[in-house]
């Protein structure tokens, strides 16, 4: 699937605005992106393993609030 990267996070993806990633859940997708772009996931997920408050993730224009949200 195509993942749009917001401008403030593009420095972690080599300036890429869209990256391809797979996974059955938001958490799996972020883990795959982090394997290619180490440190990316930490910008999205806090130390307790939750999506950071200021981060908004959308799947087909619907908000996803948990790492277990299906893709």
Image (cartoon, grey):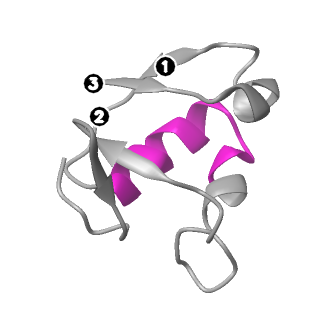
Quarter location, residue 44? bottom right
Q: Which mark is residue 30?
A: none
Residue drawn at 48 percent across, 50 percent down: 31
Read off the residue under disc 2: 22
Which comes before the other along the chain, label 1 or label 3? 3
Quarter location, residue 11? top right
Q: CA distance from mark 1 to mark 3?
A: 8 Å
Q: Is residue 55 above or below residue 9?
A: below
Answer yes or no: do the residues labelled 3 and 2 have beta carbons within 8 Å? Answer: yes
Quadrant (top left/top right/bottom left/bottom right) for the N terminus: top left
Read off the residue under disc 1: 19
Residue 7 x %, y %: 72, 25
Q: Is residue 33 left or right of residue 57?
A: right
In this view, the residue in front, 6 or 15, is 6
Q: Is residue 8 left or right of residue 52?
A: right
Q: Is residue 70 above or below residue 60?
A: below
Read off the residue under disc 3: 1
Q: Dot 1: few (<14), some (14–19), or many (≥20) neighbours within 10 Å?
A: few
Image: magenta residue range: 26-41
Q: Dot 2: few (<14), some (14–19), or many (≥20) neighbours within 10 Å?
A: some
């Amino acid at each position: 699937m195509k993942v749009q990267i917001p401008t403030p996070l593009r420095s972690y993806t080599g300036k890429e605005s869209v990256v391809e990633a797979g996974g059955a859940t938001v958490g799996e997708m972020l883990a795959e992106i982090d394997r290619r772009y180490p440190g990316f996931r930490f910008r999205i997920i806090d130390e307790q393993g939750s999506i950071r408050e200021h981060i908004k993730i959308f799947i087909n224009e619907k908000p996803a609030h948990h790492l277990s949200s299906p893709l």
